[in-house]
Amino acid sequence: MKWWQKKSVYQVYPKSFLDTTGKGTGDLRGVIQKLDYIQSLGVGAIWLTPFYPSPMVDNGYDISNYTEIDPRFGTMADFEELVKEAAARGIKIVVDLVFNHSSDKNQWFLESKSGKTNEKADWYIWRDEKTNWRSIFGGSAWEFCEERGQYYLHTFAKEQPDLNWENPKVRQALYDAANFWLDKGAGGFRIDAIVYIKKPKEFVDGEPDSDGMSSIHNMTAATDGILDFLREFKEKVFDGRDIFTVAEANGVQPKNLSEWVGKNGVFDMLFEFSHVNIMFENGAEIWHRAKLYKLSDWKKTLTESQKSTKNSWYPIYFENHDRPRPVNTFFPSGSDKILAAKALATILFTLRGTPFIYQGEELGFENTKFDSIDDYDDISSRGNYDLARADGLSDKQAMKFVQKFSRDNARTPMQWNSEKNAGFTSGKSWLPVHEDFKVCNVENQEKNPDSVLNFYRKLSKLRNSSEVLISGEYEEFFPENEELFIFTRTLNGKKFMTLVNFTTHEVNLPEKILAGGKKIAGNYSDEKNYFRATEAAIYEF
Ligand code: NOJ
């Protein structure tokens, strides 16, 4: 077993974590200050979302220099201190590689766009003609550049031009950047949007949607030949290092995971999206077209991922900086949100794989709500709003979907205490702090033995110390049941069973299922022979 299989990972979105200077945005020193807190969650690594120089069109996922620190986040010395201080607590720092695209302010792009004959002329994807592809953030995926007299491709915002991976010099420059961070002591990588790096041979129009465009995701995700690039990436960067790699891969199906991860794969883990995007057709996140889904379908996605990573490994997650808060997403309205947060934690820590905790999840954070689209910072919220309006929805109808799915839901600042701005900043917070901060904050939850925070700590400890929970085999029971999620983990005759009631009413348990078992954790302290609203428990056999 590797170190990253035995412990969880904590994801920090530095901009919203802790501001140590009063500028209104968080910084690396803020992460250093809170290392003891992070350590108390029993994690072995921190994944930091991008802190590199960036115009911040997409909050750092538009990188203008791959090997420096944006002054808003601090200095290289801060990064080095963070690596050192974290190591002193048994924690590694995992950095985010955004290699599908750079910022349009990156020197590479500035040179590339200056003409057709410069050294970096084909470092990006230039064409004389455009297709009808719609970018993931909305609008055409092609932008005309006057200077060069051609269009360039951008899977995301127009300020995020796609790099041309067909060019070996581009690939080498990216590998050099990755190696730079390993030499600085990084313990691994989270790799952004990797499924889009390989483009199809021919660029042709896709089936048009109501806006006449076709989602770029459907045209370019996981294109044949992508694994050749990734094998090279692995060989030039990951091989021989004691690190982990987890790649973001919307569009890779659970059944194909074995080609991507494990012994014959290219990464250690893959964030696939089937459980978090279950409400979207083909993974294209068009919020106002979200569909209802059945619990059995949701459970099936998790079970498929568990099965297809039986001989490899899986990153268990329900939240990150791109997702609405899961207590609002995966439980019916009317559910008690504290019970729901603990119920998700029981699944997070008992499935097979490395649990990823996103800041605030351990406190049971809920979605936020702004009234006007102008109050949203998230670029994808604006794109989705425009698409909904173009599809004929009123402002009010479109806003309902923005409030439900906006990425700003996950980006409201950490709530440390009940003081001004929840202790996040002494200045003006870049995004409003959630209105529940006086009640829901670290300081309050530290004091309450029954808090979500202390539940996370307890389960994290349980998982870290249990061979069964770390490597035991997964089996799901009653997959057709539309109220309960039940699964076991088994190793050498020892067994744990997780049970979660996803409804807001009492549910009878399948007969004798708990016979011989002993409850070791749960979000209700006592036991009944039925499961109450949102009840979750772990039994040991
Ligand atoms: C996925 C990142 O998690 C997201 O925040 C970003 O907007 C896109 N990739 C583009 O880099």
Image (cartoon, rainbow, N blue to C red):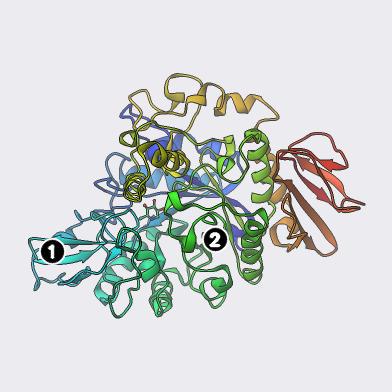
Residue positioned 53% across, 37% down in the render: 360
Vertical position of residue 233 compared to residue 161: above or below: below
Residue corresponding to mark 1:
113
Quadrant of residue 310 within the rendered picture: bottom right
Q: Is residue 220 visible?
A: no
Vertical position of residue 182 compared to residue 326: above or below: below
Element class at badge 1: loop
Residue corresponding to mark 2:
274
The crowding category of the residue bearing disc 2, from other C-alpha atoms within 10 Å (few below 14, some 14 to 19, many at least 20), is many
List x then y, in percent, for residue 170: 26, 70
Seen in the image, is 125 located left or right of residue 60? left
How many marks are shown on the rendered structure? 2
Q: Is residue 475 visible?
A: yes
Vertical position of residue 439 compared to residue 191: above or below: above
Question: 266 or 259, which is in the foreground?
Answer: 259
Element class at badge 2: loop
Quadrant of residue 506 within the rendered picture: top right
Amino acid residing under circle 1:
Lys
Q: Is the CB–ligand 1 distance for label 2 below 8 Å? A: no
Quadrant, the N terminus: bottom right
User: Counting residues from the N terminus, which is met first, the one under dot 2 or under dot 1?
Assistant: 1
Question: 163 or 281, which is in the foreground?
Answer: 281
List x then y, in percent, for residue 447: 64, 24
List x then y, in percent, for residue 79: 37, 46
Residue positioned 40% across, 65% down in the render: 194
Question: 340 or 288, which is in the foreground?
Answer: 288
Residue ranking furthest to the front: 392
Residue positioned 31% across, 47% down in the render: 386
Amino acid residing under circle 2:
Ser
- Label 2 to label 1: alpha-carbon separation: 37 Å
Q: Are marks 2 and 1 in contact (CB under 8 Å)?
A: no
